[in-house]
Amino acid sequence: MAKNNNSKKEKFLPAGKQAKTKEKKVNPVLSSWTKRWIKAILMFLVAMIISLSFWDKAGTTGKIFINVSKFLIGQVIYTLPLFFFLGGLIFLRSRKKGKTLAMFLAIAVTLLGISGILASQDLTKMQGGWTGFLMAKLLVSGFGLLAANIIFGAIILIGFFIFLQFIRNELPKENYPPAGGEEKRPSFMSQIMSRQEGTSFKIKGTEDEKSETSPSLSPGISLFKKRPILVKTSEDEETTRKRIAVSKGDFILPPLDLLSKNELPPTSGNIKESSMIIKKTLENFGIPVEMAEVNVGPTVTQYAFKPAEGVKLSKITTLSNNLALALAAHPIRIEAPIPGKSLVGIEVPNKVRSTVALRNLISHQNYQNALTPLLISLGRNVSGSPVYADLTEMPHMLVAGSTGTGKTIFLNSLILSLLYKSTPDNLRMIMVDPKRVEFQNYNDMPHLLCPVIYDATKTMNALQWLIKEMERRFEVFSEIPTRNILAYNQNKSVIASKMQLPYIVLIIDELADLMA
C-alpha cells in the first residue's frame, strides 16, 4: 500500500495559481549564497575594527568600545577578533539556516568562561572585567577556587561545542569508519556531494560478516569501483557541496538473461461451465443476469456479468457464500461494480496458479518505454495485463501484510525493477536490513550510498542525513527555481554544468523491528 502525502506533494507539483504563488515564495531577493557572504563580510569587518582599536586606529568609537569592553570582560577583549574571524569563516562554509543567533551565543558563552577563569585567579586585579569578577566571586565563595575553575572550563567547552556544531556538517565519522582501515577513504558527504567525472561507483563490502555485530566496528563507506574515483580536490568546497551529482559514465544496465522467464499459463478450469453455474445460481435467487466477459489472471479468473435493471448490488454481494458453494471454490470475491464498467465481477481462484515472472514484466514495452527512472513492477491484474507504479508520485510506500505473505519478496522485486531502469547517475539507494539476511547480496551494488545498514543507531544517522539532504535540495530548487528533481534536471543551466541530482530511495525491511 502506498500512502500519498498530499501536503508534501504540493511542494513539488502544485497546480494552477497555487504554483505561481509558491514559486514567488521560494524566490527570495537575495540568494542564500549572497546572504552568507554578507554575514561573513560583516564578521570580518568587526574583527578588523576591533583589531585596529587596540592600536588606537579606530577613532573615538574604537576608544569607547575598548573602554566599555575592558570594563565588562577585561583582558578577554583581545580574543574578540579571533572569534569574529572564525565566525565569518563558518558563515562561508556552512549552508545551515538560522545559525546567526547560535553563533553569537557561542561567542558569548566562550567569552564568559574565559573572563571568569581569568578573574578567579586574582579577584583584586579585575583581569576578567566586572562580568568575570562577579561570576568568579560568586563561584569561588560558593565552591572554592578549584571547583570554580572547573565550572568555568565547562562553560568554555560548551561554547566550543556550539562552534563545533557548525564546523561539522557531515554524518559522524565514528559511525562509518573506513573499511579495513588501510587507506583513507573519502567521507560519506564528500563522496555524495562531490562531482565525479566518468566514474561508476561500487560498494566494497566487508570481508568479515562478524564485524557487523561488533560494537566497535561499523560498515565502511566506500563508493569505489576497480577504477579510482576522480575527485576534484581543487574545486571550491562550497561548489562541491552544492549538489549531489554523478556524471554519466560507462555503467551498463544488467541483462535480462539474469532473470528467469518461466511463466506457466494459469489453469482456470472449465470457463463455460463456471459461467453457466454463476448465471443459474443468481437466477435461482431471482437475479437475472447477462454474462459479459471472462478475464483469466495469474491467480484468479474474473467472470463479469450485467445484472438486470432494478437489481440492487447489495443483493448480489450477499450471495458470495452461495456462489462459492455452487462453484466449489473458496474464497471468491465479488467486485460490484468493476471500476470503469457497468458490470459486476466475480473472482474465482484458479485451479493452478501462475507464477508471475519479473523478467516478463521488465521486458514489456510499457516498462521499457516509460521515462521515469523510478518505475516499479507490481504484477499482473485480473486480465493478465502488467501493472506498474511510479515511485516519484509516492512520497512514501508502506508494504503491509501478515507473516509469509511475500513482503520481502516484493521488496526484492521492487529493487530489481529500479536496477533494471536506473543507473547510478540518476538513482542512489540506502538499504536497512535489521534481520541481516535479506539485503546482503546488494552490498556490491554501485547504486548504494553506503553498505547495507544493520544497526538501529546507524539507521537513525542515515535518516537524519536524509532530512538534511532534503532541506538542502529545497534550497537548491529555490535558486533555479524549480518544484521537483525532474524539472531541476531538465533546466538548461543544470544540464550545461552536468550537475543533475539523482533520486535517493530509502528501503527498510522490517520497519517494526526498528520502531520497537
Image (spheres, rainbow, N blue to C red):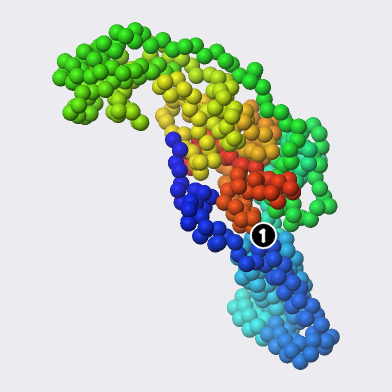
Residue 357 in the image: above or below residue 68: above
Residue 417, position as x, y percentages in the image? 58, 29
How many marks the image carries: the answer is 1
Residue 222 pos. (x, y %): 73, 39
- Front residue of this view, candidates 403 and 421: 421
Residue at 48% of width from left, 56% of height from top?
Answer: 17
Q: Of 105 and 349, which appears nearest the observer? A: 349
Q: Do we see residue 374 in this rendering?
A: yes
In-image side of 55 versus 485 (left or right): right
Where, quadrant-wise, is the N terminus in this rendering? Answer: top left
Q: Quadrant of residue 351?
A: top left
In the image, is 50 to the left or to the right of 217?
A: right
Residue located at (59% from left, 35% from top)? 371
Q: Is residue 450 above or below residue 134?
A: above
Residue occupied by mark 1: 95
Outermost bottom residue: 60
Label 1: which secondary element: loop
Q: Residue at x 50, y 33 (%)?
A: 389
Which of 290 and 375 lies nearest the eye of the viewer?
290
Which residue type does callout 1 highlight? Arg
- Report x, y in % for residue 336: 28, 28
- Circle 1 crowding by C-alpha within 10 Å: few under 14, some 14–19, many from 20: some
Q: Is residue 113 something that shows in the picture?
A: no
Quarter-of-image position of residue 61: bottom right
Residue 196 location (% of width, % of height): 76, 43
